[in-house]
Image (cartoon, rainbow, N blue to C red):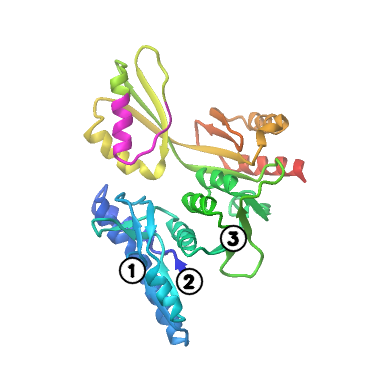
Amino acid sequence: MYLLSGKTTDRLIKEAHELALVPNDRELDVLLSSGEQVSISKLSILLNELGYNTVSLTGWQAGIYTNNTNQNAVIKSIDTSRIIKELSNRKIVIVAGFQGFNDKLDITTLGRGGSDTTAVAVAAALKAKHCYIFSDVDGVYTTDPNKHPDAKKIESLSYVEMIDIADEGARVLHNRCIEIGEKFNIPIITKSTFNNKSGSVINDKIEDNVVKSIVKNDDILLVNLKYSLYTVKLFNQVYESLIDKDILPIQLFNRSGNSFDVSFLIKASDINKFQKLLENELKEFDTSFKNISRIAIVGYGITSDSTVLKKILGIVKEFNVNIYSIDITNTKIIITFDEKIDNKLLELLHNKIFERLT
């Protein structure tokens, strides 16, 4: 079985936003799902022409049932009967990734990178021993190889570490596909479509307490809302308004004891939704927002070695940039800056940290 991600998604999103600032969620899912259907049908036509017996299946034909959330649907179950029937007939099954259907029989999509989630979910439903994810890179790297040519490929890492890497903005794998892999204990192997080099294996094995990867995320906005009076009711109103519009705020807190001075982080890709929310529901607030950067240093048990944190903070201090916040968990150190920073800091951190570990 093969699963494809559509290459036309960005173009379709752009075209939709040319028609509406915030397109209708249901109709946007109908539009975005079409790219995958074009891909699977073309591949099936080509393989059949080459003499291979293939069949393409859309999300609903493959039995991928989701909840009713548009653009970020969650797979609830998969009826594999059609897939198994086609496989028993010795056919190559090409399933459209990134999509499913809900109880209204509407098309839903799983969010950016959702084809990874489709692949691992189908693998779990078929009780596969492992799942291969092929893309334009041959594995998971210590940092983005497009930003830093000295990035090193990681041979293996745990589900927990990979989830942290994905959550912090690395676009190697969709975070929900890793959660499914962990839940059903399916090793995920990432490889390149264009070569036969060994990839990276994501499984339940936890190795030494070392840094595995450094991720820089520039897809973040720092938002500030001000109002003359602070009340708990007003604070809750803002939070609920954001959640209702599928805008997930991070680190939301009030910075003043006397007035409403709330700051939080959102994805830069949610800017159109946020601006529409400001126009319709949050007009009374004095609002400002700016692009910032966030760097996460990921590795299981990373905080057990205080010298790593000292080295990181020393490097950041030398670079003379302002830190907005520092968050520390058992598996990562997250530094959020109050400005957009140059990739040179990422390169410096990578060189110093991995120089120490090698």
Crowding around mark 2 (Cα neighbors within 10 Å: few <14, some 14 to 19, many 20+) is some
What residue is rendered at 47% in x and 70% in y?
Answer: 2
Dot label at residue 92: none
Q: Looking at the rendering, which quadrant does residue 172 occupy?
A: bottom right
> Mark 3 or mark 1: which is in front?
1
Q: Position of residue 303 (x, y in %)?
A: 66, 32
Real-space Cα separation, disc 2 to disc 1, in angstroms? 14 Å
> In the picture shown, does residue 219 fall above or below 145?
above
Towards the viewer: 248 or 137: 248
Q: Position of residue 256 (x, y in %)?
A: 40, 16
Count of numbered circles in the view: 3
Pointer 2 residue: 1
Q: Secondary structure at mark 2?
A: loop
Pointer 1 residue: 61
Q: Is residue 136 in view? A: no
**Amino acid tagged 1:** Gln
Pointer 3 residue: 189
Side of 150 relative to 332 (left or right): right
